Amino acid sequence: MNSQPNRLVGKGRLTPAHKVRFTFDGKSMEGLAGDTLASALIANDIHLVGRSFKYHRPRGIVTAGPEEPNALVGITRDKARHVPNVRATVQELHDGLNATSQNRWPSLAFDVGEVNDLASPFLAAGFYYKTFMWPQAAWAKVYEPFIRHAAGLGTAPTEPDPDAYASRYGHCDVLVCGAGAAGLSAALVAAEAGLSVIICDENPKAGGALRHEADVMIEGIVGWDWAKATLSRLAGLSNVRVLTRTTAFGYQAQNMVSLVERVSEHLTDPSATPVRERLWQVRARHVVMATGAIERHMVFANNDRPGIMLASAARTYLNHYGVAVGRRVGVYTANDSAWAAAFDLKAAGIDIPAIVDARADVPEALVAKAARLDIRVLVGHAVTAAGGKLRVSSMCVARADGTGETEVIPVDAIIMSAGWTPSVHLFSQSRGKLRFETETQRFLPGQHAQDASCAGACNGAADTAGALSQGIAAAEAAIAALNAKGKASTTALTTTGGTSWNGSLIGAAPGAEAGKVVKAFVDYQNDVTAKDIRLAVQEGMHSIEHVKRFTTNGMATDQGKLSNMHGLAIAAEVLGKPIPEVGLTTFRQPYTPVTFGAIVGHARGALFDPTRRTPIHDAHVKAGAVFEDVGQWKRPWYYPRAGEDMHGAVNRECVTVRKTAGLFDASTLGKIEVVGPDAAAFLDLIYTNPFMKLGVGRLRYGIMCREDGFIYDDGVVGRLAEDRFHVTTTTGGAARVLNHMEDYLQTEFPHLDVWLTSVSEQWAVIAVQGPQAAAIVGAHVDGIDMSADAFPMMSVREGRICGVPTRLFRMSFAGEDGFEVNVPADHGRAVWDALMATAEPLGACAYGTEAMHVLRAEKGFIIVGQDTDGTVTPQDAGLAWAIGKNKTDFVGIRGLKRPDLMASGRRQLVGLMSADGSTVLEEGAQLVADPNQKVPMTMIGWVTSSYWSDNAGMPIAMALLENGFARTGEKLYASAAGGAGFVEVIVRDTQFLPTQKTGADHG
Amino acid sequence: MLLIRCPYCQSDLPELEFRHAGEAHIARPEHIADVDDATFAHFFFYRDNPKGLTYERWRHVHGCGRFFNAVRDTVSDKFVTTYKAGEPKPDLPAAANANEVAK
């Protein structure tokens, strides 16, 4: 085969010397720099590029732009860089581009899945709902895998995306979406008036429809050249940012528009740029939507054969790329603009056997020009079917009214136009209201919901001249609305040439009317035919939203850019309703597919979520700690020694703490400093406990409820001075507890003079627990009397440790003698190291969160969020003592008196022991009274915490159990791990260790 | 992303700096311990869910930290106004009519 047999000498705007090599399905080919994959394929006389979604019908290139429904290919750079479902019509050609067709096996020309086309009577609209009804079990194993295998697009790469994506915010006075005639004139006028402007266009170059309308002259020069000159003029202005290859894909509230800029997709070497794509979130004071219009196809039998395409696409391939879409091109239209395409092709030496126009009346001038060019014209006729399979070979033409003979005209391509659909996607996303213009059968922008305007073909402009003047008018409106100081020097632009974009046919063309059993495709990508839409209405889908979902019309990745209006018109006809009464389906973001990479940007891997490390973190790493994630924190879980597994390490740590001592990094605790004359009064309202009489230097364990009376958080509060408290919260509760306190302070108790300051990250906290704790801490303390008399449990002293200031809490979450050593965060590591140096010779060790959990459970101390779940009151948790009996107000006081909360039989926190003395229950295991009852069983509670305790010599567990306090000694059953029956358990209290005199009560 | 005007900072700032805090103008009963069940239920559980103008609280959590009130249209997401906590509930029939446009 000749290289690029369809490339015409002297046609188009590309440079013949700039050759580029690419491959399609493994075959090496040649194109030109500036080609799209589609134009290069057609230059090589390739129209067959894929197989359809459902019926596996051979499919070709239909369009020359982003609306392409058919020509979806995979583009592979390397193993990790494979992009499926790329529209060949927008993929710019570069050296080494490697494209493959999709949804075919074993080959594009011979595809086994094609049997679906023969089976199509069984695959009509809604076949999912009808065919695969039963048996239900077959869904997972038979039906779904079959459907997924048979119907599909490309495959995603399995390796991680190696590319980087950027994200930027943009701010401007005027954002112009679209750089065709309307957008360019709007941007120019706005910029000249001194407004800051961002103009974007999804194409690599400006010009829009001027790309194919080669006869248009603006200000005396060729339209395409005017566009190029205008864009470079704009790019040279300091108040303008030009973004090409950038799609405005989403219109949010308050004039925020999302753009995606494709930075490296067109380059041979993607590493030449730092990012592959860039997401722009632009906030504009005014938005000009100049988004153009999309030509529609004609709905006739076999209108999907490769070689059948839009007239404007054929004109683009000819006038821009210098490529003929065929050598003998039939024309089927209901619209003037297709005639212009026919004239251009004829002038380029392409045989046009006939122009078939379904309209009864056609402008005289067109007919006259066709006669001059010696083109046969068949007005009032229809193409009733296309012949050929892997490539169109003929068109059957008959009178539109169905009378007379059918003539078969041999062709190798058919170009078609049913008219232009204004691209109102962005306008509709902005929540603007559409209006239906009956004369031209179009939905056009009506009332705006945001500060925006529409200009050009998307706004109903009939031709280039109209687009230019609408662009200028939109800019002038923006100038007035924004009170711009400058004045535009451009007030009008002169034009000649071009065709009208009005004139329209929507719905099925003659020959594909109701009753005809033909495959006249409305939605190419989802294989929806005119017949399917009629069937859907007949089967009761009267809402257009139902028709859409039943038929899947417009639900493919192209979102019905070609098909929606046709589908709507056919449905309206069957329903016997006017189109605006049937209504449009919702236009959703994104306008065209956007990569997840662009949306995610930098927020992946280590940057997905911040990692919080305590000031002592590196010491834990050095000690070989295994870490667990607690929210954003990395916390040491356990410190395994040589030969130890997790259980071995945790058992050793737990025993060491009770026998000697252990050090624990508690820096993640939330810490809030509560200061002010009313600090005590405030805490008295926030906590259930009384705080007015807490002495200076004393600690108190406090419970915090919400107004509903359920436990919200807990922690130890220390009074440092009359007007100063050091409050601790749970690790996970730090932020919300501060928010909760601020809320009450600012809005319900604003009369209280109190200041709240988060000091979570200012203090490192080292818990030293166990019989040797006082010896370890005491060795480093200055100015604090460590004797139990002078410094009893549940007290706080300020002094110095290791030479740095400390707030030393004498308290324990392990139920031993113990301390929580608060030191300024910067000194945390040094103090930890010093304490460890003293502790280790005594036989003490560091312990992690797992041992901490076991130690506290041995003493029956709860963890909010593990043993409580937002439905547990202090009484339910056995903490009734923490509620101030004489208080007249605190948050939760009324909620606690609600009838349900005071009722008997509530779920209460109890201890459980396994009857066999060895089985560790599963956390979350359900409790039942009778394991032999019928399913579904009556469940009376569940296990909240469960561990093996070496100190107790048995498994220990806590559970929330209905009427639990009264069930002490009862035998119940807990569901066993993996659904393997039940474990017999006995209800008991939560004190699993023999009570000793430690003073480690909750105070 | 919405732009929200903080009435304390007197500045339009991105939604990311704020946190929604539920319906506005629900006062905690003064003697809450003494109110009956129905009063408590209405205070704590009952909330409006209007189509149109809603009065709601926001906190400028990543800014000045203050709680304030806002009038927002739940259909268009448009903020009609924001005002400081403690200020009276604005009467906005005009804004309610403007809502017709967004529907």
Image (cartoon, coloured by chain):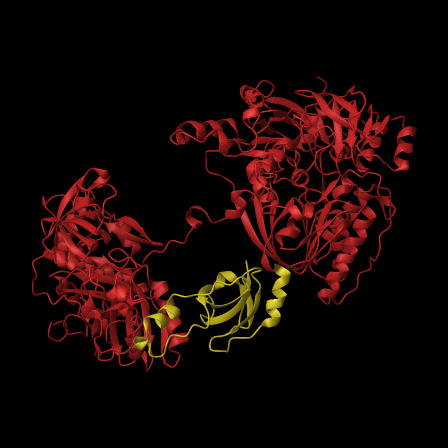
Q: Is residue A12 above or below residue A864?
A: above
Position of residue A340 in the picture relative to residue B88 (left or right): right
Residue A573 vertical position relative to residue A651 in the rendered view, above or below: above
Q: Quadrant of residue A45?
A: top right
Q: Is residue A321 visible?
A: no
Q: How many marks?
A: 0
**Closer-to-camera residue (A580/A813):** A580
The front one of A401 and A239 is A401
Assign the C terminus of chain A to one quadrant of the image: bottom left
Q: Quadrant of residue A680?
A: bottom left
Q: Quadrant of residue A338?
A: top right
Chain coloured red here = A
Q: Position of residue A671 (x, y in %)?
A: 31, 67
Q: Is residue A531 left or right of residue A668?
A: right
Residue B82, given in percent of the width and then of the height, sits at 54, 71
Q: Which of A409 and A288 lies nearest the eye of the viewer?
A: A409
Q: Nearer the viewer, residue B12 or A170?
A: B12
Q: Is A650 above or below relative to A83? A: below
Q: Is residue A753 above or below residue A91?
A: below
Residue A314 visible in the snapshot: yes
**Which chain gets the yellow colouring?**
B
Q: Position of residue A672 (x, y in %)?
A: 33, 69
Q: Quadrant of the N terminus of chain A?
A: top right
Q: Position of residue A739 (x, y in %)?
A: 38, 67
Question: In the displayed structure, does residue A122 sit left or right of residue A424?
Answer: left
